[in-house]
Amino acid sequence: MPNMALKPTRFRYAPAVGLALRWAYKLEAALFREYGYSMNATLEEITREALLLTPAQRAELADFLVESLDLTLPDEVQRLWIEEANRRLEEVRSGKVKAIPGEDVLAEARRLAKR
């Protein structure tokens, strides 16, 4: 049975804290269903400590953690952009899309910005 320590019974906290607690509980339940175990004590401790941070500090921590998940290497990003540029060039050459002169795009952007 998963460790229910993080399951909130009431959300008396700020919405972000309540959301973090719900997320942590759902993650723990998913880990238990998938692997038959709950979060280890260290992860639970880190979660509790993180919830004590100010909202700005939690946002910074969340940003850092999300960025740490991006495993795309710079060479891979460059390769993907080259593929995208070649695909777009082929669409223009084949007539699949119509190119719009840059001056027209900028004029339209300026017109819309004045609204």
Image (cartoon, rainbow, N blue to C red):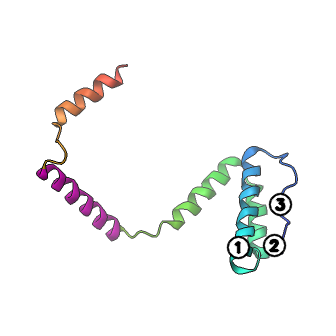
Please identify the residue farthest to the bottom as the structure is shown.
36
| Spatial CA span between label 2 and label 3 | 10 Å
Judged left or right of residue 2, residue 69 is left
Q: Is residue 59 left or right of residue 2?
A: left
Q: In the picture provided, is 85 more to the left or to the right than 68?
A: left
What is the number of callouts on the image? Answer: 3
| Label 2 crowd (10 A; few <14 / some 14-19 / many >=20) | some
Say if 106 sits above or below 1 in the image: above
* Whole-number angstrom distance, CA of label 1 to CA of label 3: 14 Å
Asked whether, in this view, residue 3 is left or right of residue 92, the answer is right
Q: Please, what is the three-letter code of the amino acid marked with disc 3?
A: Lys
- Mark 2 and 1 residues: CB-CB less than 8 Å, in contact? yes
Q: Residues within 10 Å of mark 1 (few under 14, many from 20)?
A: some
Q: Earlier in the sequence, mark 2 or mark 1?
A: 2
Residue occupying the point 73% across, 63% down: 26
Q: Amino acid at mark 1?
A: Leu
Q: Determine the image quadrant of residue 14.
A: top right
Q: Provide residue 28's location: percent of width, then percent of height.
A: 74, 69
Give the farthest residue toward the left.
93
Helix, strand or loop status at disc 2: loop
- Alpha carbon separation for disc pair 2 and 1: 9 Å
Residue displayed at 63% across by 51% down = 59
Chain part drawn in magenta: 75-94
Residue 64, given in percent of the width and then of the height, sits at 57, 60
Name the spot of residue 11 as percent of width and height, x first.
Answer: 83, 48
Marking on residue 7: 3
Q: Main secondary structure of the magenta part?
A: helix
Residue beneath disc 2: 2
> Callout 3: helix, strand or loop?
loop
**Residue on which the image places disc 1:** 31
